[in-house]
Image: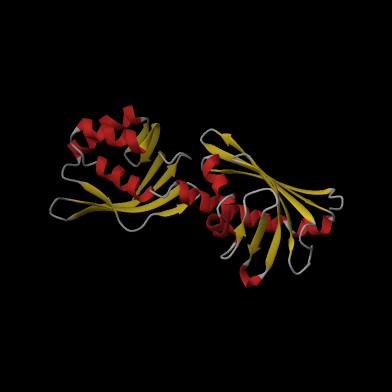
Amino acid sequence: MNALPHLLDRTVVIQARPETVFSFFTDSERWASWWGAGSTIEPRPGGRMYIRYPGNVEASGEVIEIVPPERIVFTYGFNSGQPIPPGSSRVTIRLEATGYATRLRLSHEFAESRVRDEHIQGWRYQLAVFSNVATNLANANAATLVDAWFGAWSETDQAVREKTLAAIATPDVRFTDRFSLLQGLADLQPHITAAQRFMPDTHMKRNGDVRHCNGTVLVDWIASASDGKEKGKGVNVFTFRADGLIESVVGFWG
């Protein structure tokens, strides 16, 4: 390989654990989920790296180094030879834990600055796609946790409610809406008891599918009485910690 003096650097934080993030470098199905259908990777030194972009644009290279769950290095170029042929640039991706999340550092080395500059926006886009597919996996059970959250507001048995909330939310979970400004499960528990007293026979449930982006989940909800009469509706914004637990909830009525 010729000298590669021109460097493209990009760092992002992904709301998933390093082991989850790294699995997208070692499994061809997951690799294809952020590059394109038909893309494959052989996760070993000397293994083939292949990317099929939309429009049948193909890129390929060779895995140089792989150290789970910390680092992968591979060569990169286009099968057509334009703007660079296979093997003519080098990509290094490093992962490190930051709290429960993952800091990803990308370095892409090129022989020419012109070609490097052509890839800047491409990596902005590709790493955004990557972060979303990784957090989709990390939060695959988001709908179940959201349903449990709403169910806890109707649960009158305090012990059962405590157990439910401890299993789905962080100890310092934040909750805010027009009637709430809470920090932590110890603050949330008596607030729910009070809500049951002052808003009796109110049952909340999810209204439609959850919408997820990078650890943030948007959820429509409806509140009804036991007879089915609607008492209110709105939308909640859930933030999930990288280990999959609910970290904060902001509720909007109406």
Q: Position of residue 243 (x, y in %)?
A: 45, 39
Which of the 4 image quarters holds residue 48? bottom right
- Please give the name of the residue rendered at 30% of the width and 56% of the height, measured from the top-left corner: 207
- Please give the name of the residue rendered at 38% of the width and 48% of the height, measured from the top-left corner: 141
Q: Position of residue 93 (x, y in %)?
A: 67, 45
Left or right position of 76 against 18: right
Q: Is residue 13 visible?
A: yes
In the image shown, does 186 or 182 lie closer to the viewer?
186
Left or right position of 234 against 243: left
Q: Residue furthest right?
A: 3
Total marks drawn? 0
- Please give the name of the residue rendered at 57% of the width and 45% of the height, measured from the top-left corner: 22
Q: Is residue 236 visible?
A: no
- Please give the name of the residue rendered at 39% of the width and 43% of the height, measured from the top-left corner: 250
Q: Position of residue 117 (x, y in %)?
A: 78, 56
Q: Position of residue 217 (x, y in %)?
A: 42, 50
In the image shown, does 184 or 49 lie closer to the viewer?
49
Left or right position of 5 against 167: right
Q: Residue furthest bottom?
A: 55
Left or right position of 47 against 182: right
Coloration mode:
secondary structure
Image vertical order of residue 48 relative to residue 96, above or below? below
Image vertical order of residue 131 relative to residue 35, above or below? above
Q: Residue furthest top?
A: 186
